[in-house]
């Protein structure tokens, strides 16, 4: 494939998920029993043959760094390229970025150094599989300036979003930011391809003109001046932009087809942890659940995602819950629609319940 | 500063493990899967790093492919080092002499140059077929404290089993006055665990003497240790208390796997202080929809059937209506709907067809006995056809 460098936003749109991003970047939100959200964009890059990835960070990136380490679990601990953290306050910016455009400015020195012809930019708040090299092929075939990846689904009006229309050739003819329209649209998934030199010119130009919004000031007027194409992402896509979508997309993994689509090839990389295999006691009753290494189950579990090291005490009934790593549930508890962040302890006999659209959320390290 | 290591470990991983039959047809014994997500070699390697020993030579000879690939650069055990780390040592061709490893002592002898690269004061000799957690550093401290030339780790075993082991006869101060390899009438129940610490200079000396002796079988237990004893070297026993199991036979391998089960297991792998490391697979958490009782399940599993008292390895699929009882499933195994598995060890990459029957319920199987004590064994890559039948105690190496 064409030589390509990757850039990942590990810390963007966090205002959508205040509970889960209080102590971490959006990219390091635990997902699916053993993963972090950033694993999807990063693994997609690695599986597309990209070996140099710049990771844009903002604040609270300790847990992200802990997860990524040297990048070795993604085969990105390299002499040439590899995983490169781009912390805030780089030589190009003296401030903590407030928007996507300012964040991009922080990548300028990284991109200037890159020898790769093309750049893929992706957010880290979504679960999907995509071979970015196919997007680049499409980009080259169209001789495009910018290729934007979209997924067709019902527009979600909960946050800032971009939809667009394309003509038969796939060229973007109309681009809307936060449109009022309902229904199924081509939703931009914040994955974009361009020539590295072209992107650098865009960023430079934006700052010369004092632009502040990548969407409003560059993409929206760009459809007239640049050749912009849309690339359709087929298959599963879920943007984690609320606690309920977080809940839904975890829950989706209990569906065999979705699980196979995402994990069937065993190529979603993540930090490896040496926990002992999950243990099921003689009293365990587990139905329709994902159970990670290190779990110890003595009670009843249904429709749950149990992360590493979760303990479910005797007599407890846990249904429709997402329990992140090292949650300890005591004896005779009753939990339904609970999302519990890491390291929390639920004492014996507690009854906690939320509902599907509004799960009951427990902060990291709580004692209840 | 001269770079050196105080203690270098040499791990004997070349044995064929012929008493594991089909399980070691194509792989060396230390590479055999254990405990759902481990391989036997994880235990000595993890013990090394957990004891502060970061230089390990792994001596391979028999079917080393899987073992070599598994050990790799040693990264899963933090043994990828710029100085030291884990090194695979295979037999090699030399100018005047080309030879396979002719015995445990000869294998170490052929790698004296490797050990000398690190100029160690002590050498720890380990076997690749034991399941245990041990702090070698404590044993090394005892070796130094006693100013010993050789320290042998040992543990008490039931006296009726003592004739299966190398038996140490010791004085009250722990010094060894006699070493008997598999005695018919053991005088004590103190069994050697096959774990030795040598003062390096003594080890080199006795390996060279042993090499020069044409009558020697080049074996530590039979030749080197008795020779040192006869020469009056200071040999100490080091008592180990805790779980230790030689998994050289089908039934001991099955038992060791079962020792992981239960809320208070005979062998606990869940404690955080001495974590056993392994090359963890890239699989999502296990999906469990069926019934899983008193069992352990590794990642990547899809369990929709019934699992009782079993160890289920990575990426195992147990379809609806299938039943797995008292079994060890090593990894990447598909058990199709309606199949019944009882008292069996199933190696990696095996498919068991619909309604096939493997083994017999344990009480019945135990009456069969035979080479495996009634345990049915399916070798790597075997397929069992739909409605196929594998009897209790049967060993299957080819698809049926």
Image (tube, rainbow, N blue to C red):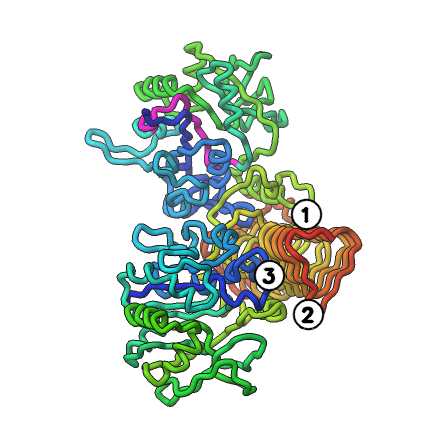
Task: Determine the secondary structure under disc 1.
Answer: helix
Residue at x 64% of width, y 51% of height: A343
Distance Cα–Cα, label 2 vs label 1:
52 Å
Crowd tier of the residue under label 1, counting other residues whose Cα lies within 10 Å: few below 14, some 14–19, many 20 or above? few
Q: Reading the chain from its start, which is encountered first: label 3 or label 2?
A: 3
Q: Which residue is mark 2?
A: A358
Q: Residue B223, how many percent across, how many down?
A: 41, 20
Determine the chain carrying the residue at label 1: B
Task: Determine the secondary structure under disc 2.
Answer: loop
Q: Residue A125, how many percent across, how many down?
A: 51, 66
In the displayed structure image, the side of residue B7 where residue B340 appears, left or right: right
Residue at x 44% of width, y 41% of height: B78
- In magenta segment, residue A94: no
Determine the chain carrying the residue at label 2: A
Q: Residue B184, how many percent across, how many down?
A: 55, 22
Determine the chain carrying the residue at label 3: A
């Amino acid at each position: 494939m064409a030589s390509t460098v990757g850039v990942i936003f590990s810390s963007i749109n966090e205002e959508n998920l205040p509970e889960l991003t209080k102590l971490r970047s959006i990219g390091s939100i635990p997902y699916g029993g053993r993963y972090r959200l950033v694993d999807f964009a990063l693994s997609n890059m690695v599986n597309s043959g990209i070996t140099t990835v710049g990771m844009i960070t903002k604040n609270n990136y300790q847990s992200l760094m802990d997860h990524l380490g040297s990048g070795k679990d993604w085969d990105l601990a390299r002499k040439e390229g590899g995983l490169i953290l781009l912390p805030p306050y780089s030589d190009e910016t003296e401030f903590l970025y407030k928007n996507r455009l300012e964040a991009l400015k922080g990548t300028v020195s990284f991109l200037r150094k890159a020898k790769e012809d093309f750049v893929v930019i992706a957010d880290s708040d979504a679960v999907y599989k995509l071979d970015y090299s196919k997007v680049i092929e499409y980009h080259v075939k169209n001789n495009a300036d910018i290729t934007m990846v979209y997924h067709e689904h019902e527009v979600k009006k909960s946050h800032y979003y971009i939809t667009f229309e394309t003509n038969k050739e796939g060229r973007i003819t109309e681009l809307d930011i936060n449109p009022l329209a309902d229904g199924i649209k081509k939703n931009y998934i914040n994955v974009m391809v361009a020539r590295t030199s072209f992107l650098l010119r865009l960023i430079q130009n934006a700052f010369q003109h004092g632009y502040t919004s990548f969407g409003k000031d560059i993409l929206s007027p760009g459809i007239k001046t640049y050749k912009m194409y849309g690339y359709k992402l087929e298959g599963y896509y879920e943007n984690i932009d609320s606690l309920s979508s977080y809940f839904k997309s975890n829950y989706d993994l209990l569906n065999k087809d979705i699980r196979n689509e995402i994990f069937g090839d065993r190529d979603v990389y993540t930090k490896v942890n040496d926990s002992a295999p999950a243990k099921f006691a003689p009293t365990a009753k587990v139905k329709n659940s994902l159970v990670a290494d290190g779990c110890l189950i003595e009670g009843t579990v249904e429709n749950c995602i149990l992360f590493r090291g979760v303990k479910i005490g005797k007599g407890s009934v846990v249904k429709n819950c997402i329990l992140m790593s090292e949650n300890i549930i005591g004896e005779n508890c009753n939990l339904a629609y609970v999302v519990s962040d890491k390291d929390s302890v639920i004492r014996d006999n507690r009854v906690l319940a939320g509902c599907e659209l509004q799960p009951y959320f427990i902060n990291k390290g709580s004692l209840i | 500063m001269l770079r050196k290591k105080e203690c270098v470990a040499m791990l004997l991983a070349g044995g064929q493990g012929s008493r594991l039959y089909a399980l070691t047809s194509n792989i060396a014994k230390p590479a055999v899967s254990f405990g759902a997500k481990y391989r036997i070699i994880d235990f000595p390697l993890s013990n090394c790093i957990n004891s502060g020993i970061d230089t390990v030579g792994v001596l391979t000879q028999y079917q080393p492919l899987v073992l070599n690939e598994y050990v790799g650069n040693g990264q899963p055990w933090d043994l990828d080092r710029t100085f030291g780390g884990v090194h695979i040592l295979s037999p090699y061709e030399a100018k005047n002499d080309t030879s396979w490893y002719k015995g445990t002592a000869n294998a170490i002898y052929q790698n004296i140059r490797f050990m000398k690269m690190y100029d160690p004061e002590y050498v720890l000799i380990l076997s690749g077929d034991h399941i245990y957690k041990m702090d070698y550093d404590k044993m090394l401290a005892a070796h130094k404290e006693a100013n010993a030339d050789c320290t042998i780790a040992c543990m008490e075993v039931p006296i009726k089993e003592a004739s299966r082991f190398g038996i140490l006869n010791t004085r009250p101060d722990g010094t060894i006055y006699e070493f008997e390899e598999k005695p018919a009438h053991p005088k004590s129940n103190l069994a050697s665990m096959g774990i030795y610490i040598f003062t390096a200079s003594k080890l080199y000396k006795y390996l060279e003497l042993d090499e020069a002796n044409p009558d020697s079988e080049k074996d530590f237990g039979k030749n080197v240790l008795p020779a040192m004893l006869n020469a009056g070297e200071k040999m100490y026993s080091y008592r180990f208390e805790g779980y230790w199991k030689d998994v050289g036979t089908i039934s001991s391998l099955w038992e060791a796997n079962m020792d992981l089960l239960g809320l208070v297991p005979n062998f606990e792998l869940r404690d955080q202080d001495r974590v056993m490391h392994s090359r963890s697979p890239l699989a999502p958490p296990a999906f469990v929809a069926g019934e899983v009782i008193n069992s352990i399940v590794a990642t990547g599993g899809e369990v929709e059937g019934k699992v009782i008292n079993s160890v289920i390895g990575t990426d195992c699929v147990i379809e609806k209506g299938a039943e797995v009882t008292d079994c060890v499933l090593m990894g990447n195994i598909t058990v199709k709907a309606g199949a019944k598995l009882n008292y069996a060890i199933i190696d990696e990459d095996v498919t068991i067809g619909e309604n096939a029957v493997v083994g017999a319920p344990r009480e019945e199987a135990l009456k069969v006995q035979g080479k495996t004590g009634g345990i049915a064994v399916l070798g790597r890559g075997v397929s069992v056809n739909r409605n196929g039948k594998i009897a209790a105690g049967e060993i299957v190496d080819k698809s049926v």
